[in-house]
Image (cartoon, rainbow, N blue to C red):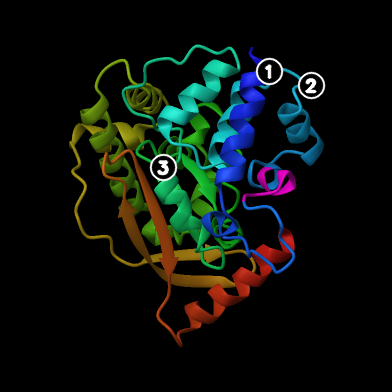
Amino acid sequence: MDRAQLAGFLRTRREALQPEDVGLPRGRRRRTGGLRREEVAALSDMSTDYYSRLEQQRGPHPSEQLLAALARGLRLTLAERDHLFQLAGYAVPHRAVRADHVNPGMMRILDRLQDTPAQVVNHLGETLTQTAPAVALLGDETRYSGLARSLHHRWFTDPATRLRHPDEDHPIHSRLIAAHLHAAYARDGRGSRAAAIVDALLAASPEFAELWREHPVQGAYCPPKRFRHPEVGDLELHCQTLVDPDESQMLLVFTAAPGSESYEKLQLLSVIGDQRV
């Protein structure tokens, strides 16, 4: 690990970021042109002291998970992310699809949606980051590890995942999720993470196995979805989707018709989300 180079790289990227780039107000008293250390630490879900020690060349050897969080917090490109890993002494493996790194452009859009339920999801159904209202609506979907990171896997193996939707809607969700996973498998092929999820589900879920044999195909239209929230009740929401050019991740934004009961409930959830955070 090259502490001096790592510290210099973190400092230059922090100073290059402007508050507006990450959805923060500039404020009248700001003297520095870039972000403050405490702001980068908050964006990366770590303590200010830990991040400061990295910039001062006296911190511990960061883990790969921590480096991935820094890459997201600093809005690094894939090339910059790989460089960060190399400076920290990690080999950068070849990745056919960079499904675990949020595109900086996606992050810039998400930063401007902090009062809206929105999240970035990769093609494997893994949620990479969420706004606070999205956590209030769906729960923290970034907390899982292993195969459970994938909504596709949780839907067919964890009954609690289905509690957010009315029972009568479960069959259509099952078919849509199976179709989405089928598209990911067709894209990535044997030996991929998508294939590992498919193999696990074929062994664990007769429902999935039956759907898989039908070769479901994902449609272009996404109809309104009904959600069942434990605190505000039922909502009917539209899910607007922005797909990254390489189609490895999507920005999902949940909206309701203005003036509707669901719209009022979304406003309440935004308040709940802020209080929980």
Disc 3 secondary structure class? loop
Q: Residue at x 77, y 39 (%)?
A: 47
Vertical comparison of 163 with 187: above or below: below
- Residue 232 seen in render: yes
Residue 179: where, in percent of width, then height?
Answer: 25, 42
Mark 1 packing: few (<14 Cα in 10 Å), some, or many (20+)?
Answer: some
Upstream in sequence: badge 1 or badge 3: 1
Q: Which residue type carries mark 1?
A: Arg
Q: Are marks 1 and 2 in contact (CB under 8 Å)?
A: yes
Residue 211 picture quarter: top left
Left or right placement of residue 97 versus residue 58 in this view: left
Q: Residue at x 68, y 17 (%)?
A: 3
Disc 2 secondary structure class? loop
Residue 218: where, in percent of width, then height?
Answer: 21, 47
Q: CA distance from mark 1 to mark 2?
A: 8 Å
The N terminus sits in image quarter: top right
- Residue 142 seen in render: no
Res 103 label: 3
Q: Nearer the viewer, residue 252 or 234?
A: 252
Residue 215 falls inside the magenta stretch? no
State which region is magenta: 34-40
Disc 1 secondary structure class? helix
Q: Residue at x 29, y 47 (%)?
A: 175
Q: Residue at x 74, y 46 (%)?
A: 38
Q: Which residue type carries mark 3?
A: Asn
Mark 2 packing: few (<14 Cα in 10 Å), some, or many (20+)?
Answer: few
Upstream in sequence: badge 1 or badge 2: 1
> In the rendered image, which residue does mark 2 sit on?
58
Q: CA distance from mark 1 to mark 3?
A: 26 Å
> In the rendered image, which residue does mark 1 sit on?
3
Left or right placement of residue 245 versus residue 121 in this view: left
